[in-house]
Image: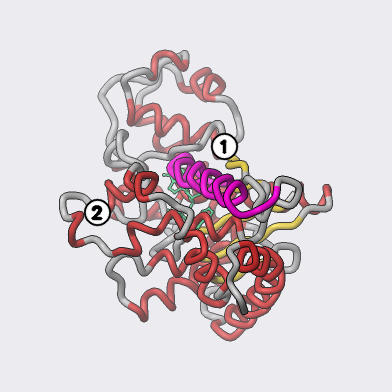
Amino acid sequence: MRIVSGIQPTGNLHLGNYLGAIRNWVRMQDDAARQGGDCLFFLADLHAISMPHVPADLTANTRAMTAALIACGIDPERSTLFNQARVPAHAEMQWLLNGTARIGWLNRMTQFKDKSGKNREGASAALYTYPVLQAADVLVYRATHVPVGEDQKQHLELARDIAQKFNNDYASEDAPVFTLPDPIIPADAARIMSLRDGTAKMSKSDPSDMSRINLTDDADAMMQKVKKARTDPEPLPSEPEGLEGRAEARNLVGIYATIADIPVADVLRDFGGKGFGVFKPALGELLVEKLAPINARYVALKDDVAQLDALLNRGAEKARMLAKPTLDAAYAALGLCR
Ligand code: TYM
């Protein structure tokens, strides 16, 4: 069991990241410790340069996100925690895999279509080949399990296609270079939606900060955002089926259920028939209660630049060692002399 996953350090860690991915990272870190597996978690800073960015912000965000991950429960003693830029094997492996990835496959990636929008010609080449770097991220460690939110599923299917084609084209059946990774997507929180629009996912790139709960928000800000969240005028239904066609209500009830770790039906048993005037303060309080300890740990860690850098260096050293055997095997399989 080798668990590998990453997050872009492009802004604050928000509730979608936490419930969709990071909470699973922490749970899998504990499973891995019990089952003798290992975990690698990284800041995808190389992915972050696929969009226009401010270099100094990227440096600061990489450290801030490292502090946020530790605050959520990622333990750098038990998991290998690092940023991609400190481990050149990611970029090297991407180039090796570029020979195997097909243009037709990349053309189908919905994230590229979403992020390039109407200006495809003006998008960076990095945004286009982004999924190949993501494949390299997991394949270079022979990851078996990759905990992510629903929006990353297509990228992981591509990673599997690349691994399979590379193994077929360049490796013998009894000694494949790559392992096919399985995406691990939470059933309940695969897609946390924006607080302003129940049909758009909660995202770092949404220009409105009111659309997301950041793990770095203080209690007042969290409460305000929940109270201002868009809803409809109807009271909550008593059964989950009653949430059909009510995207915003479904999202808020789903967040409550996920964070309280109870089924949606149980939330509706308590709140069915009640209006949002009752439900929203209860949700706000629950969020504050669960996220305040994370926030406190984050605040205590975030300014210790020396410690965060030392920790990322240590993680990267280990990651470079773990990446080497697969990288060497891929160079050799392609007939590249070194
Ligand atoms: P990123 O940085 O956008 O998000 C990090 C993780 O959070 C999940 N997530 C969500 N889950 C549920 N609801 C939401 N609204 C929501 N928003 C984000 C994402 O699915 C992800 O798991 N390309 C990746 C980073 C990456 C990566 C990798 C992931 C780079 N290399 C290798 C896994 C393996 C990304 O941009 O995630």
Above or below, 197 against 276 in this view is below
Decide if residue 224 is in sight here. Answer: no
Residue farthest to the left?
118
Expressed as whole percent of the image width and height from the top left, the position of residue 278 reads: 40, 30
Expressed as whole percent of the image width and height from the top left, the position of residue 16 reads: 45, 46
Q: Nearer the viewer, residue 338 or 131?
A: 338
Expressed as whole percent of the image width and height from the top left, the position of residue 129 reads: 38, 58
Q: Residue at x 53, y 46 (%)?
A: 148
Under circle 2, the secondary element is helix
Residue highlighted by disc 1: 186
Eye-nearest disc, 2 or 1? 2
Q: Is mark 1 within 8 Å of ligand 1?
A: yes
The mark nearer the N terminus, 2 or 1, is 2
Which span is picked out in magenta?
147-172
Residue 42 falls left or right of residue 226: right
Is 161 magenta? The answer is yes
Q: Residue at x 16, y 50 (%)?
A: 118
Is 303 magenta? The answer is no
Residue highlighted by disc 2: 116
Q: Amino acid at mark 2?
A: Ser
Q: Nearer the viewer, residue 322 or 289?
A: 322
Q: Amino acid at mark 1?
A: Pro
Q: Which mark is residue 285?
A: none
